[in-house]
Image: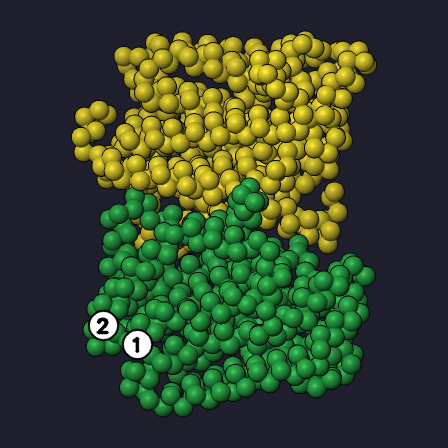
Chain colours: A yellow, B green
């Protein structure tokens, strides 16, 4: 990889990064409305002072910050500033990740890589600036996965992946299903591709899986605090103070502090999800077709069984999200996680694997032969951002609402 | 099916889906009270400005006994108007695509930019049912007539209808038509000179007579208040200030200074954020003017024809709509020049595109970036501008 550095036009890369920075600012101001969902403020009220509960890491960080700094951040303004700072850090990590990739890509292949990274940026920045997802702990999880990917690209300090992924699980146990697959897929690629460092990557892979899965099981089953009523109301009161409308997320607190599962109230959300995911797939059918066509071509054209296995693992890696799709209701977030997985892993592969690069380039050239449908295909996905939480996006939400009102009556 | 035809069908199929999604999407929005003046104002008390739509509503309600004197009735009328807008726009795009056979690549890029601005322009609460929706329909129809070399008398009739819908048609939509006719005159079709004179005379006469009669008869804001409360989405919440704005909005020459507020700041922010496009446009137009040595004056008129819009920026408060028309002016003029196979425009467009590809690492961003600023709203231009302006002020 270092041999091609002298061929790279750095000026063009820097202009690209400058454009991305401007885009981040524009996307942020386009989507940010100052609102923070009560779920995201309630999580900040959860911390380890009530016991080693799941999702308590960020709240503990918030608590430590309030104790370290000489001003009171236990109020609405403090929460906004705290979350804004971490959102800005999130954007910086995205830019750093993009720079890591583009500066290593040769001139002849960089344009398609830049388009993939552009979409990654648009999806992530829009979604996590909008009122539904601003301040959500997902940004920490994505940051950690992107940083782990950067360590793997740089081939330095890869051992840090183990503690970083563990911290991510402490932030939200859903990391194991949502964003750990990015790190594991890239580790699997390296295990199957690299002879010299195979042993090291196997250890990191197995350790990450064991520790993260162990933490998930513990946090999901054993870690609920079972606090007294007084403590529950104290936490609820703190959570109310952090929210602009004075509300706290009852389901979250009941689940984390009392171990009470209120998921039976989510039946109507499941029906909404079913309707919207069908609509989403129909509306994005061209991309689904291109995806499966490319997948078949890549796997069937692989030179040997090891490569076939490698590419199959990459394509199937998103299936770790399946339990979330089946059991949980935040389909907007699962869609973002799925898109992020494929864009990050394929960007990495584009850099490392000549076969993938050639196949993707050929696929793009084939789509471009359909004239200016290519331009429409580039622009169309922008209509669907920002992604939401229970609703996938504004279009499927609207069409789903109309269909339900007129025909379905599912919710 | 031949390869070329297949590409065309796919391209327009994608455009139609894009437009349908936007049309469905606008169902979530309600008509803003500030647009109701158009449906209230009518010719019952004599000729006035911006009375045509209101008169049609009265005709439908009183003569045909359609249920239009309610929010639902007005909403249905607006949705039909929006559908007509999309149909006319699509027919215009298809027609120019087929006529501009030699410049399909350039025209496709321009179509994408036009759709970015127009597809959801009237699909928000502040612009749904506004006079600009009907005026834009008339504008696209007029250009369709001119591009297909149909008799310009039809354009004169359409201009009259446009001016009757709202006097602002003269400063918002007419510049495109006048400049296009001027182009045809200077390309040796002198008969269009008569049509320019007729267009300008008739439209200005309608505007000045209408405005004069409206101002003479007084604001009649109590009529707006009464009907506004019947037609408003929430009954009896129509404010007196909205009634006053409605009355002023029917005229062209009554200034709306008191309603501008801080939207001038939004305008500055928008121009700054769109600076790359301003620079690209400047470079493109400069190349056209420099290469057209003998006909520099004509291309100078086209280049600076948008100066007419500054009248609107000074006296009116709907800056979002003005921005829409300025952008549409340049895009539509470029499209018709491509259809007319103007060599200076063709060469400059290709040179500008090549220069962009050399200098910009990812030119596709230039197509995606405008989408972040839409939908354009009536007054505040864009959510981004409002958010940044709120931080500053």
Residue A163 location in percent, x, y?
Answer: 47, 11
Q: Which mark is residue B380?
A: none
Name the residue: 47% across, 15% down.
A164
Residue marked by disc 2: B292
Residue A384 location in percent, x, y?
Answer: 53, 46
Name the residue: 21% across, 68% down.
B291
Q: Nearer the viewer, residue B8 or B62?
A: B62
Q: Earlier in the sequence, mark 1 or mark 2?
A: 2
Q: Nearer the viewer, residue B225 or B72?
A: B225
Q: Is residue A101 in sight in this rendering?
A: yes
Q: Residues within 10 Å of mark 2 (few under 14, many from 20)?
A: some
Instruction: Report which quarter residue A326 is drawn in.
Output: top right
Report whether B83 appears left or right of B271: right
Residue B378 location in percent, x, y?
Answer: 58, 60
Q: Is residue B208 above or below residue A229?
A: below
Q: Nearer the viewer, residue A12 or B85?
A: A12
Q: CA distance from mark 1 to mark 2?
A: 9 Å
Q: Disc 1 vs disc 2: Cβ atoms closer than 8 Å?
A: yes
Which part of the image, by quadrant, shows the C terminus of chain B? top right
Q: Is residue B231 above or below residue B393?
A: below
Q: Which mark is residue B298?
A: 1
Name the residue: 80% across, 69% down.
B226
Q: Residues within 10 Å of mark 1 (few under 14, many from 20)?
A: some
Report in which chain the residue with disc 2 lies: B
Circle 2 sits in a helix, a strand or a loop, which is it? loop
């Amino acid at each position: 990889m270092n041999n091609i550095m002298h061929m790279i036009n750095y000026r063009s890369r820097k202009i690209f990064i400058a454009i991305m920075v401007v885009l981040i600012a524009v996307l942020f101001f386009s989507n940010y409305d100052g609102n923070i969902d009560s779920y995201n403020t309630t999580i900040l009220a959860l911390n380890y002072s009530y016991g080693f509960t799941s999702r308590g890491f960020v709240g503990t960080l918030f608590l430590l910050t309030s104790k370290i700094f000489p001003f009171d951040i236990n109020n609405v303004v403090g929460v906004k500033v705290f979350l804004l700072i971490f959102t800005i850090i999130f954007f910086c990590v995205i830019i750093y990740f993009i720079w890591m990739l583009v500066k290593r890509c040769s001139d002849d292949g960089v344009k398609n890589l830049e388009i993939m990274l552009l979409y990654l940026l648009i999806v992530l920045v829009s979604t996590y600036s909008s009122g539904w997802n601003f301040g959500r702990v997902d940004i920490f999880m994505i940051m950690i996965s992107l940083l782990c990917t950067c360590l793997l690209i740089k081939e330095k300090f890869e051992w840090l992946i183990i503690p970083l992924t563990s911290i991510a699980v402490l932030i939200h146990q859903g990391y194991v299903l949502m964003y750990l697959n990015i790190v594991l897929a890239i580790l699997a690629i390296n295990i199957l591709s690299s002879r010299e460092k195979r042993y090291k990557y196997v250890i990191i892979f197995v350790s990450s899986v064991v520790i993260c899965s162990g933490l998930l099981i513990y946090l999901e089953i054993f870690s609920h605090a079972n606090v007294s009523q007084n403590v529950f109301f104290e936490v609820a009161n703190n959570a109310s103070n952090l929210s602009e409308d004075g509300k706290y997320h009852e389901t979250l607190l009941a689940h984390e502090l009392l171990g009470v599962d209120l998921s039976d109230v989510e039946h109507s959300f499941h029906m909404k999800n079913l309707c919207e995911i069908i609509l989403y797939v129909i509306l994005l059918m061209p991309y689904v077709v291109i995806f499966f066509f490319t997948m078949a071509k890549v796997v069937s054209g692989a030179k040997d069984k090891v490569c076939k296995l490698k590419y199959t693992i990459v394509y199937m890696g998103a299936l770790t999200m399946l339990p979330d799709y089946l059991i949980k209701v935040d389909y907007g977030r699962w869609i973002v996680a799925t898109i992020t997985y494929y864009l990050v892993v394929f960007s990495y592969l584009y850099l490392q694997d000549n076969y993938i690069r050639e196949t993707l380039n050929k696929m793009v050239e084939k789509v471009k032969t359909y004239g200016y449908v290519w331009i429409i295909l580039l622009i169309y996905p922008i209509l669907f951002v920002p992604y939401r939480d229970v609703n996938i996006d504004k279009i499927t939400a609207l069409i789903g609402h109309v269909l339900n009102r007129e025909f379905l009556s599912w919710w | 099916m031949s390869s070329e035809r297949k590409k065309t069908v796919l391209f327009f199929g994608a455009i139609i889906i894009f437009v349908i999604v936007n049309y469905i999407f606008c169902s979530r929005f309600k008509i803003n009270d500030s647009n109701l003046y158009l449906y209230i104002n009518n010719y019952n008390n004599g000729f006035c400005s911006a009375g045509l739509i209101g008169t049609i509503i009265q005709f439908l309600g009183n003569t045909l006994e359609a249920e239009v004197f309610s929010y639902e009735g007005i909403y249905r009328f607006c949705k039909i108007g929006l559908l007509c807008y999309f149909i006319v726009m699509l027919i215009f795009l298809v027609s120019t695509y087929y006529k501009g056979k030699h410049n399909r690549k350039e025209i496709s890029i321009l179509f994408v930019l036009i759709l970015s601005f127009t597809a959801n322009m009237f699909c928000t609460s502040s612009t749904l049912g506004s006079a600009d929706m009907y005026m834009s329909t008339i504008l696209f129809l007029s250009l369709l007539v001119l591009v297909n070399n149909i008799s310009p008398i039809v354009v004169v009739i359409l201009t009259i209808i446009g001016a009757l819908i709202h006097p602002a048609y003269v400063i918002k939509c007419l510049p495109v038509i006048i400049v296009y006719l001027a182009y045809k005159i200077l390309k040796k079709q002198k008969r269009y000179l008569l049509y320019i004179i007729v267009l300008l005379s008739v439209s200005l006469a309608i505007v000045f007579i209408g405005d004069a009669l409206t101002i003479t008869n007084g604001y009649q804001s109590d009529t707006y208040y009464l009907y506004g409360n019947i037609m408003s989405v929430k009954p009896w919440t129509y404010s007196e200030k909205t009634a006053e704005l409605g009355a002023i909005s029917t005229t062209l020459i009554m200034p709306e200074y008191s309603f501008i507020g801080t939207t001038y700041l939004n305008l500055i922010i928008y121009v700054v954020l769109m600076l790359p496009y301003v620079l690209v446009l400047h470079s493109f137009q400069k190349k056209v003017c420099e290469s057209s040595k003998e006909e520099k004056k004509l291309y100078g008129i086209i280049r600076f024809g948008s100066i007419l819009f500054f009248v609107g920026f000074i006296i009116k408060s709907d800056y979002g709509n003005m921005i829409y028309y300025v952008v549409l002016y340049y895009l539509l003029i470029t499209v018709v020049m491509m259809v007319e196979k103007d060599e200076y425009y063709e060469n400059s467009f290709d040179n500008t595109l090549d220069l962009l590809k050399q200098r910009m690492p990812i030119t596709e961003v230039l197509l995606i970036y405008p989408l972040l600023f839409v939908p354009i709203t009536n007054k505040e231009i864009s959510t981004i501008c409002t958010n940044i302006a709120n931080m500053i002020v």
